[in-house]
């Protein structure tokens, strides 16, 4: 198993974390001691034929890299990211940002390769990438009981088609599993191996389900937002940010934004598919997670920052939202 975690990562750190994976640093020209990323990455071999790469880092350069991707199946979940990446001629979809500069929705992919292909990555300085990629060899799949049955025919056909792929909106469970891989707790090596393998298998299950059903994951279809509605949503996020440590009163919030409480609830439901209360809680917890990851504050400080008087209640809400305790994502 090879991994790397730290605040600033140099070219030497990334080469070491890659465990000998052949990566070409095309541009800019960098020395081994030059800092390339800020954040955390990992390249981990779980068992023969099964590996995982995770990233939660910000690029410090406009960086162009190339590598050779081996045959097999790759499952990826992109939670956040604006990089441009290709496998051979196929561009890999990433969340990016919408017309208003807001992060796009997470996206998941599974693709198959019957022969090696060149992997290209073009990153821009200051952009954060949060993602999990799982590499699966054909042999690893074939060794599993039940793979020879007719039920697995769609997967076998998928594997034989070079650059076959499926793209879907990952479900809440898959997003939670990806978050847990990106920010794992500190565990003894044996338990960590089990922890990681369990979550990787969960993501593989959802991905292969896309292949076997040949249908995208169910997603709620919402009408596109008008320009005025997008502006109101920006105003809502600004209001929540300036009242981060305070309890939010729906009526007062609506009045401050020039909306009725009903209109406010309706807009949040249309844009995010959830209640206003859920959106407020998610906004606070997401800001707390960012502060824990990037600023190295304590769990108690994060709790008070977003209006929780009890760190224990905050930890419970955090675990329910992200599937792991807040201490697991602190910038150690």
Image (spheres, rainbow, N blue to C red):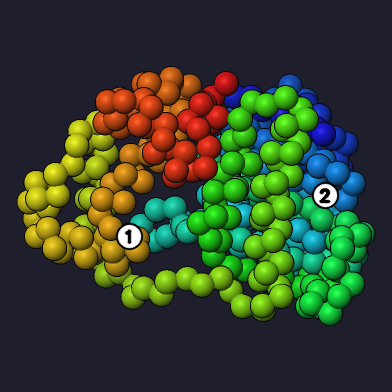
Q: Residue at x 53, y 37 (%)?
A: 324
Is disc 1 placed on a helix, strand or loop?
Answer: loop
Q: Left or right of 266: which side holds 255? A: left
Q: Which mark is residue 57?
A: none
Give coordinates of residue 61: x percent, y percent.
Answer: 61, 37
Q: Quadrant of the N terminus?
A: top right
Give coordinates of residue 167: x percent, y percent.
Answer: 62, 68
* Dot placed on the residue nearer the N-terminal end, 1 or 2: 2
Q: Residues within 10 Å of mark 1 (few under 14, many from 20)?
A: some
User: Mark 2 highlights which residue?
Assistant: 50
Q: Quadrant of the C terminus?
A: top right
Give coordinates of residue 114: x percent, y percent.
Answer: 89, 67
Q: Residue at x 41, y 75 (%)?
A: 221
Callout 1 touching callout 2 (CB < 8 Å): no
Give coordinates of residue 33: x percent, y percent.
Answer: 74, 22
Is disc 2 placed on a helix, strand or loop?
Answer: strand
Position of residue 207 relative to residue 67, above or below, is: below
Q: Would you say residue 219 is visible in this rendering?
A: yes
| Number of numbered discs overlaid on the protein picture | 2
User: Mark 1 highlights which residue?
Assistant: 274
Position of residue 199 relative to residue 195, above or below, is: below
Position of residue 6 relative to residue 99, above or below, is: above
Is 234 in front, or is 329? Answer: 329
Q: Residue at x 58, y 74 (%)?
A: 216
Q: Residue at x 66, y 71 (%)?
A: 210
Looking at the rendering, which quadrant does residue 217 occupy?
A: bottom right
CA gap, disc 1 and disc 2: 36 Å
Is 227 in front, or is 160? Answer: 160
């Amino acid at each position: 198993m090879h991994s790397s975690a730290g605040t600033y990562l140099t070219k030497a750190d990334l080469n070491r974390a890659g465990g000998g994976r052949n990566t070409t640093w095309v541009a800019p020209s960098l020395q081994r001691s030059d800092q390339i990323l800020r954040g955390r990455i990992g390249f981990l071999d779980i068992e023969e034929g099964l590996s995982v790469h995770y990233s939660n880092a910000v690029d410090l350069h406009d960086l162009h890299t190339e590598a050779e991707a081996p045959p097999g199946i790759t499952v990826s979940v992109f939670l956040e990211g604006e990089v441009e990446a290709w496998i051979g001629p196929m561009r890999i979809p990433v969340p990016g940002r919408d017309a208003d500069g807001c992060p796009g929705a997470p996206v998941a992919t599974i693709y198959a390769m019957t022969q090696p292909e060149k992997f290209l990555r073009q990153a821009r300085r200051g952009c954060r990438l949060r993602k999990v990629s799982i590499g699966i060899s054909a042999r690893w799949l074939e060794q599993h009981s039940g793979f020879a049955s007719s039920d697995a025919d769609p997967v076998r056909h998928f594997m034989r088609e070079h650059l076959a792929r499926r793209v879907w909106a990952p479900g809440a469970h898959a997003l939670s599993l990806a978050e847990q891989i990106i920010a794992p707790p500190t565990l003894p090596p044996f338990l960590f191996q089990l922890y990681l393998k369990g979550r990787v298998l969960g993501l593989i299950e959802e991905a292969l389900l896309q292949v076997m059903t040949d249908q995208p994951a169910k997603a709620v279809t919402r009408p596109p937002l008008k320009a005025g509605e997008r502006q109101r949503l920006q105003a809502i996020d600004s209001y929540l940010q300036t009242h981060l440590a305070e309890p939010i009163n729906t009526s007062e919030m609506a009045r401050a934004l020039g909306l009725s409480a009903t209109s406010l609830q309706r807009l949040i439901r249309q844009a995010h598919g959830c209640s206003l209360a859920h959106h407020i809680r998610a906004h606070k917890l997401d800001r707390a997670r960012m502060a824990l990851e990037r600023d190295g504050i304590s769990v108690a400080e994060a709790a008070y920052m977003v209006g929780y008087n009890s760190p224990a209640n905050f930890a419970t809400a955090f675990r329910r939202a992200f599937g792991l305790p807040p201490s697991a994502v602190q910038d150690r």
